[in-house]
């Protein structure tokens, strides 16, 4: 990890985007307020709208007042923050326009000029990434041409490509302009406290890891459910679908964190090596096993959403059974279920252990009622629960499931950082551990491409809004 730099400019492409308004400006404001940003910092918004610096400042101020993450916005500090904001109008595909960006960067950083540390943030639709990166390079702003000690880095939002082929192309384009240690492929799930805690929970406690194998674990369930639909993202969803939007990144990253081997050390690459090995060990999907391994769904009413085709076959739900063909996990099913407009909003990982060899306290099949589970709740609850059987008070010996629970809220009083706080800081400090490496992006796409291929032509099954998803999703549990 690098030292805290003494100067820093964030260049935000997509300055008027929802992401910038909801996540980036509030996070940068708070990081500055908490003293985490270099003292000499600037934020340069880049967008298609014609705005003066002043207009941009008042727009951002308005967004901060709407979306600030519970921070009391002090007027003086807000003013100080806004005085660090600048704006440049740019048509992203017009290479000539990047001269203006170059000149503006020189103008707003008069002391440091291009010795400045610069973090480019692509808060733009994913298909614009290649043209922006090529033009940055042509405009003399590429990451490999730094001078006088200033670094240039780039944060790219997901989805990173739309399949293996386009991800490779994107990797080639970006890799020609920025070196891998300067490319930060963001998956905001990796900035969530309970997600970062998965590795700590597994490898800082001696009692769980010896049991964390096929010898003791019956199955693992990963759920990413939302009780709302695609909101106003019809155009995006029609191109992406749930497999690309959530499974390729968030779900596979959770799976890798649960299944990885202990890393050699805590360097970013050691940790990412182990996660990548999990992705490479996933059993290939075949047409023969497709029916029992993959169920796709679409919520009723999806086709009536804005910017959605009336005959769309895009999935808003997926239930997928994975097997990891390695020494630790062979034949342990990993059930992954993710969807929009389901009955609840929850992200949770349930590790269910095998039953004891002899069930003294009921019929053999009753064991699953009290089977031991480790339940890692990522959100909205941030808890870890251990489920076990206990004797119900009374004459008869009847076992009931009971829980031991750790809750972040009651065990810690420290104010938490949001994923964007954390990941922005990590990028500034050069810590890659919670960003996706090129090989893992490609391996995740290979998995999603294979899933898409085996279900090719299958219509997603309709499911009612606020239900548990398509009825046939139970198929994968057989
Ligand atoms: C985004 C997806 O990456 O993650 C959205 O594009 C999804 O579709 C969101 O709603 C979920 O993030 P979180 O942090 O709210 O669970």
Image (cartoon, helix red, strand yellow):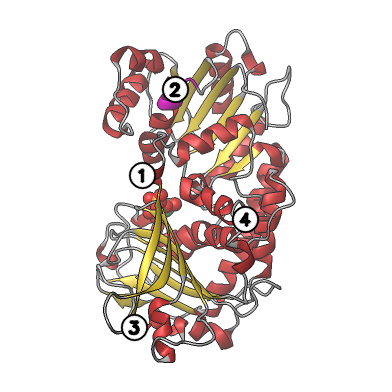
Q: Residues within 10 Å of mark 2 (few under 14, many from 20)?
A: few
Mark seen at residue 441: 4
Q: Toward which corner of the image does residue 80 lie, by quadrant?
A: top left
The answer to whether one can see residue 87 in this image is no
Instruction: Please report contact status of discs 1 and 2: CB closer than 8 Å, yes or no.
Output: no
Disc 1 vs disc 3: which is toward the camera? Answer: 3
Q: Earlier in the sequence, mark 2 or mark 4?
A: 2
Above or below: residue 36 compared with residue 109 = below
Whether the residue under disc 2 has CB within 8 Å of ligand 1 = no
The residue to which callout 3 is attached is 397
Q: Position of residue 331 (x, y in %)?
A: 61, 80
Q: Earlier in the sequence, mark 4 or mark 3?
A: 3
- Find numbered disc 1 in the image and state the secondary structure of the residue it sits on: helix
Q: Nearer the viewer, residue 414 or 238?
A: 414
Q: Which residues are magenta?
A: 29-35
Relative to 429, 237 lies left or right: left
Instruction: Please report contact status of discs 1 and 4: CB closer than 8 Å, yes or no.
Output: no
The residue to which callout 2 is attached is 34
Q: Main secondary structure of the magenta part?
A: helix
**Residue at coordinates 41% horizontally, 25% vertically from top-left?**
29
Above or below: residue 105 compared with residue 63 = above
Give the CA distance from mark 1 to mark 4: 36 Å
Q: Earlier in the sequence, mark 3 or mark 2?
A: 2
**Residue at coordinates 34% horizontally, 26% vertically from top-left?**
60
């Amino acid at each position: 990890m690098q030292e805290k730099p003494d100067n820093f400019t964030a260049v935000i492409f997509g300055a008027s985007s929802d992401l910038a308004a909801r996540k980036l400006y509030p996070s940068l404001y708070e990081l500055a307020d908490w003293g985490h940003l270099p003292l000499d910092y600037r934020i340069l918004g880049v967008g298609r709208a014609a705005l003066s610096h002043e207009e941009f400042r008042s727009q951002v101020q308005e967004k901060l007042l709407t979306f600030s993450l519970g921070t009391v916005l002090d007027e003086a500090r807000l003013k100080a923050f806004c005085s660090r904001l600048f704006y440049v109008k740019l048509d992203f595909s017009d290479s000539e326009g990047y001269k203006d960006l170059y000149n503006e960067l020189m103008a707003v950083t008069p002391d440091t000029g291009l010795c400045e540390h610069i973090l480019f943030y692509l808060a733009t639709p994913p298909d614009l990434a290649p043209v922006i990166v090529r033009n940055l390079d042509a405009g003399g702003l590429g990451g490999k041409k730094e001078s006088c000690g200033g670094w240039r880095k780039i944060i790219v939002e997901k989805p990173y490509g739309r399949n293996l082929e386009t991800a490779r192309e994107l990797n080639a384009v970006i890799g020609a302009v920025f070196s891998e240690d300067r490319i930060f492929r963001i998956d905001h799930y990796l900035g969530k406290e309970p997600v970062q805690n998965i590795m700590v929970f597994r490898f800082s406690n001696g009692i769980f890891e010896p049991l964390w194998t096929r010898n003791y674990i019956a199955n693992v369930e990963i759920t990413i459910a939302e009780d709302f639909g695609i909101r106003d993202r019809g155009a995006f969803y029609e191109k992406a679908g749930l497999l690309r939007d959530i499974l390729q990144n968030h779900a596979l990253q959770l799976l890798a964190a649960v299944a990885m081997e202990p890393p050699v050390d805590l360097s970013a690459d050691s940790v990412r090596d182990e996660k990548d090995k999990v992705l490479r060990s996933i059993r290939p999907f075949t047409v023969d096993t497709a029916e029992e391994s993959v169920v796709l769904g679409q919520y009723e009413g999806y086709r009536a959403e804005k910017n959605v085709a009336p005959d769309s076959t895009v999935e808003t739900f997926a239930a997928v059974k994975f097997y990891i063909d390695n020494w630790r996990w062979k034949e342990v099913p990993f059930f992954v279920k993710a969807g929009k407009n389901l009955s609840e909003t929850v992200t949770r990982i349930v590790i269910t252990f095998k039953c004891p060899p002899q069930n003294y306290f009921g019929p053999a099949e009753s064991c699953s009622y009290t089977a031991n589970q480790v339940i890692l709740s990522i959100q909205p609850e941030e808890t870890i629960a251990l489920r076990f059987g206990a004797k119900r008070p009374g004459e008869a010996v009847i076992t009931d499931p009971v829980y031991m629970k750790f809750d972040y809220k009651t065990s810690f009083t420290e104010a938490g950082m949001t994923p964007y706080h954390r990941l922005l800081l990590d990028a500034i400090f050069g810590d890659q551990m919670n960003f996706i490496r090129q090989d893992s992006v490609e391996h995740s796409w290979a998995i999603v491409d294979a899933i898409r291929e085996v279900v090719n032509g299958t219509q997603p099954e309709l499911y009612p809004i606020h239900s548990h998803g398509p009825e046939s999703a139970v198929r994968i549990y057989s």
